[in-house]
Amino acid sequence: DNGARRCFFHVTGRPRLNSGRGRLNFIPMKYALALALFLTSLCGAEKKPFVLYAMLTEETKVELSDGAVWLMDKGDVFPVAAYKNQQKNIVLRLAGATFMTETARTRILTKEEEEKGLEVYRKNVRAYLESTAKKIQKSLDEKEAPKPPSGE
């Protein structure tokens, strides 16, 4: 044999190189492995989404993506939406709005701190939603207000 590889004919009739070690069994095993991985992913426990929470380390004035300007307190907690400018800035989320601040003004919460941080975040979301609802109601009231009669 002198280390030469043997040539076998495949189903198509073309010659196929084979090392003689059962290489033909590799393809069905690949499909069996893929099927096994797929089935285990279906049977796995419900996955919790990965979310980082950041706490502000100092009082910070921010402009939200909807144009509102808020003064955030030290200790307020928000989910991290993204990092920008090579992680010099951090984008935080408040309900449906986002805002950006310097990363140095925040710290990422540990798993043990997240539950208490979520309580703070929910309080901020409630305040934001109430404020937004009041703004919307005020603008609707102004549109519906009767116009003064014109001086004819």
Image (cartoon, rainbow, N blue to C red):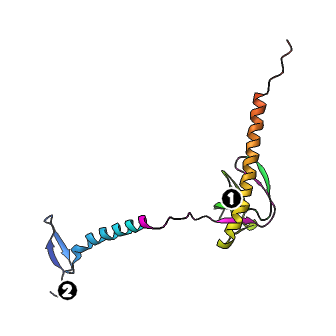
Marking on residue 52: none
50 left or right of 69? left
Q: Is residue 65 above or below residue 136?
A: below
Could you say which is closer to the camera, residue 47 or residue 139? 47
Residue 144 is inside the magenta segment:
no
What residue does disc 2 label?
3
Residue 133 visible in image: yes
From the top left corner, tell me how far across and down residue 59 is, in percent: 81, 62
Residue 5 location, quadrant: bottom left
- What's the amino acid at mark 1? Leu
What residue does disc 1 label?
92
Residue 117 location, quadrant: bottom right
Residue plotted at (63% across, 65% down):
52
Residue 120 location, quadrant: bottom right
Could you say which is closer to the camera, residue 147 or residue 107? 147
From the top left corner, tell me how far across and down residue 96 is, in percent: 66, 50
- What's the amino acid at mark 2? Gly
Q: Residue furthest right?
A: 151
Q: Nearer the viewer, mark 1 or mark 2?
A: 1
Q: Are marks 1 and 2 in contact (CB under 8 Å)?
A: no
Categorize mark 1 by other alpha carbons within 10 Å: few (<14), some (14-19), many (20+).
many
From the top left corner, tell me how far across and down residue 49 is, in percent: 56, 63
Mark 2: secondary structure: loop
Residue plotted at (77% across, 32% down):
141
Residue plotted at (34% across, 66% down):
35
Q: Which residues are magenta?
A: 41-66
Q: Report the Cα–Cα distance between label 1 and label 2.
A: 63 Å
Q: Residue furthest top?
A: 152
Residue plotted at (71% across, 62% down):
119
